[in-house]
């Protein structure tokens, strides 16, 4: 598993503590400000996690999911939201969305250019 990021150029190492293994990793950004850590021994849990990073000031990210990412693309019909368009609702969609038993699905919508 790889965790990566970027930020301002640093001369002082930063500390990253992934919640999947609770180990503390000291990282230093490269000349372009990018950094990464790799851990091939841990399998992430299926539940949302907390991620902490510190360069002297702790930043905590909540509700972090790790796993497969599926991207869907296609013609204009891929643009339809799950609930349908205005004046063109998808029958039963609001109930399906509201009553979903899977709290770990995340939707990301990239607006058309």
Image (spheres, grey):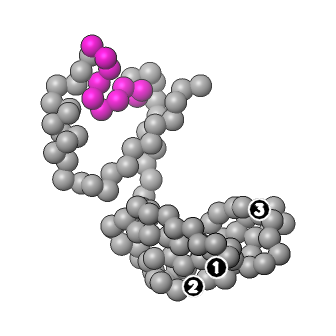
User: In percent of the image, x 51 and y 35: which residue is there?
Assistant: 110
Instruction: Give how far across and how far down residue 42 sits, in percent.
Output: 45, 80
Q: Nearer the viewer, residue 56 or 44?
A: 56
User: Which of the labelled discs sits on residue 15, or is there none?
Assistant: 1
Residue at position x 29%, y 24% in the image: 84
Could you tell me how far apart the alpha carbons at marks 3 and 2 are, in whole angstroms? Answer: 21 Å
Residue 37 left/right relative to 31? left
Check contact, mark 3 vs mark 2: CB within 8 A.
no
Q: Is residue 2 visible?
A: no
Q: Which residue is mark 3?
A: 8
Q: Position of residue 6 (x, y in %)?
A: 69, 61
Q: Residue furthest top?
A: 87
**Neighbourhood count class around disc 2 (C-alpha, 10 Å): few under 14, some 14–19, many 20 upward:** few
Residue 94: % across, % down: 20, 33
The 10 Å Cα crowd at callout 1, few under 14, some 14 to 19, many 20 or more, is some
Residues drawn in magenta = 78-87
Label 3: which secondary element:
loop
Q: Is residue 49 inside the magenta stretch?
A: no
Quarter placement of the C terminus: top right
Q: Secondary structure at mark 2?
A: loop
User: Is residue 32 rendered to the left or right of residue 96?
Assistant: right
Q: Are marks 2 and 1 in contact (CB under 8 Å)?
A: yes
In the depicted structure, whether residue 113 falls above or below residue 55: above
Residue at mark 2? 24
**Spatial separation of the CA atoms under disc 2 and disc 1:** 7 Å
**Residue in view at x 57 percent, y 67 percent:** 59
* Rendered image quadrant of residue 95: top left
- Mark 3 vs 2, N-terminal side: 3
């Amino acid at each position: 598993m790889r965790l990566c990021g970027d930020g301002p150029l640093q001369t002082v190492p930063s500390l990253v503590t992934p919640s999947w293994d609770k180990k503390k990793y000291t990282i230093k950004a490269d000349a372009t400000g990018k950094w990464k850590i790799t851990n091939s021994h841990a399998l992430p849990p299926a539940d949302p996690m907390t991620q902490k990073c510190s360069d002297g000031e702790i930043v905590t990210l909540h509700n972090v999911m790790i796993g497969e990412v599926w991207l869907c693309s296609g013609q204009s019909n891929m643009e339809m939201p799950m609930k349908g368009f205005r004046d063109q609702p998808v029958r039963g969609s609001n109930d399906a969305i509201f009553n979903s038993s899977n709290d770990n699905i995340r939707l990301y919508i990239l607006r058309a250019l």
